[in-house]
Image: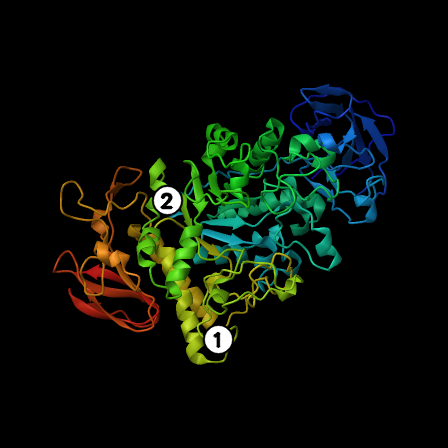
Amino acid sequence: MSQRRPAPEVAPVWPGRPSPLGATFDGRGVNFALFSDHATKVELCLFDSADARAESRRIVLPEKNDQVWHGYLPEVRPGQIYGYRVYGPHDPGSGHLFRPGKVLLDPYAKSIARDVRWTPEIFDEESDSAPDAPLARVVDTSFAWQDDRPLRTPWHETVVYELHVKGFTMQHPEIPECLRGTYAGLASQAATSHLRELGITAVELMPVHYHADEPHLVRSGRANYWGYNTLGYFAPDPRYAASGPEGAVAEFQEMVLALHAAGIEVILDVVYNHTAEGDHRGPTLSFRGIDNAAYYRLDDDRTRYLDFTGCGNSLNVGHPRTLQLIMDSLRHWVLEMHVDGFRFDLASALARELWEVDKLGAFFDIIHQDPVLSQVKLIAEPWDLGPNGYQVGNFPVLWTEWNGKYRDCVRRFWTGRGGTVGELASRLAGSSDLYAHNGRRPHASLNFITAHDGFSLRDLVSYDHKHNEANGEDNRDGNNQNDSWNCGVEGPTNDPAINALRQRQQRNLLATLILSQGVPMLRAGDESGHTQLGNNNPYCQDSPLVWLDWNHSADERALLAFTKRLLHLRRTQPVFRRRRFFQGRAIHGEDIKDLHWLKPDGHEMTDCDWQSGHAHCLGMVLPGDQIDETGVQGERITGDTFAILFNAHDEPVPFCLGARRRDVGWTTVIDTADPDAPARTFPHMGIYPLHGHSLVVLQASR
């Protein structure tokens, strides 16, 4: 990366251009462009170092065109540290909060030179914030990408792994200590080998955009570990850079290159619904002081914000310049940083045109027609905290959704609650009831049972109640409804029977997830039984509580091996990753179904059976010769036939193994009650002794 040269004491300022926004180095100088419709003057502030308490120069941007203030400095080079002072009316009743005493972060900053320092001057409206404000750095984002190209892994072959860059690598013994917790650590062979051997095709990185820790957390000695408090939408967070803030951009690019070389796509969890400036009492760090009325959704009382996020404010996606900011940010991460897709936090907030959620809003229209963004993976968290915010199943084509209904149903079934088999069948088969109505396919359902928000898989089977005391909020934070079951004892126990049941329940949940139709998402650490000791909201815990522990016990190593078996089975057998929904009826006029649902007596489920509130057992048969799909070369896709038996009851169930053809027998592939048992073969109409709280996978044989 080029080293910064101090700006000369006297330098020419040329008019420059209004586009692109941000600080753009063209090889000879830097163009600075900042949107503000209501400003009366904009000063560019140049700092000699990240530690400087004041700018060394202020330069009035000489031009304003199309709501953009701009100027070109021919002597400035990458490495230059800068901010802005923006002048205009301070009229809170009209939504204008200009304060030229505040040095402001460029919303288009591609590199962060200094984090915000929470001093009284930051909050005091009359004080100068130059000593403590976050600052940007001019950076050249060009990179030697070699022959790197988008992997474009088909959705039906995708397995998503949600991880935190720091938490995944911080305690890995095979990663050099100086690289742990960083982008470079995730790029290491030790990290990529684990992902590849596990069977992961895409990592979903928890937020890596530059974020600010909330002041109340800093005062208590905590941090916003999760990072859902974005301030810089173009900059990789420098706290995850082994090479320091100056090298964060290149280090992130090198990480993407290494993951792509391992066959792993990179999906970013992005937070475009609110910013780190908080509510009307929050600090003026960037957007608020640049053009508050344009960037934020204002209430009828324009001194207050509409808040659909629970974080104090909501970005005004209805304003064309705010919408441009989001689209420019997304394109930057695809084109300059080579990421493969995005998961949109609280995506319903982005769909609110005025008040109601509008799935045909401008946000979706623009993405759908964009030649870059329409080609990457798009994942919605389909809810927010506003009215009618729960929108699972209502997003348009091109979008895959975190399927919260899948999570809730699978959890309820395996806790032994009755009345769930009907919905369970829909979830196992890809949730056509949610996604088929507008022409979407099974991959529209991103299936998950656990995620960063909530219990880990091990805690889901070990705790009935959350234990969030470490967060400092008297256990009031986090979800109270977890659909969890502690298997008889709250938390850790030495009881071998309970620990065995918990291991089995983890295997049940993993097998259900990985063998369901749709796209499975694993939470990092669940493959080896990571625990957070019952904390279901560790957003502020940057500690070994949330960092993955790679020193695995025998049980944890066994669970990891079991997860690898499951993912290998999914990868090699097309019946578990269909591209189209099951027909569940005669195909091509023949009385041959592509899906069967069985009762323990071997007969097909009836309408009455689906309505039973006491059913805890179900069989699912997937004929491999009736997939009725073609490959990319037009070849007909076929595979082996499998049956999956589910028993959430305490007691064992003798399950009769029926089949379409009487010359077909069954061989065990997986039995969660005894995962290491040798394969056994059963004849047609043979009885399988299905243990309580267990799942069995059988393969048809002749």
Q: Which mark is residue 434?
A: 2
Which residue is pictured at 21% across the width and 47% down the height?
A: 626
What kind of residue is marked 2?
Leu
Point out the tag, 1 or 2, that comes first from the N-terminus.
2
The reply, left or right, for residue 280 in relation to residue 343 is right
Task: Look at the image and tell me whether residue 537 can be seen.
Answer: yes
Specify few, some or many for label 1: CA neighbours under 10 Å numbering under 14, 14-19, or 20 or more. some
* Residue 85: image location, x then y, percent: 79, 32
* Residue 576: image location, x then y, percent: 32, 52
The reply, left or right, for residue 56 in relation to residue 420 is right
* Residue 690: image location, x then y, percent: 27, 70
| Residue position for label 1 | 489
Which residue is pictured at 55% across the width and 40% down the height?
A: 349
Q: What element does badge 1 sit on?
A: loop
Task: Please say if 660 is above or below 91.
Answer: below
Which residue is pictured at 67% across the width and 62% down the height?
A: 472
In the rendered image, which quarter contains the C terminus? bottom left
Task: Please say if 365 is above or below 122.
Answer: above
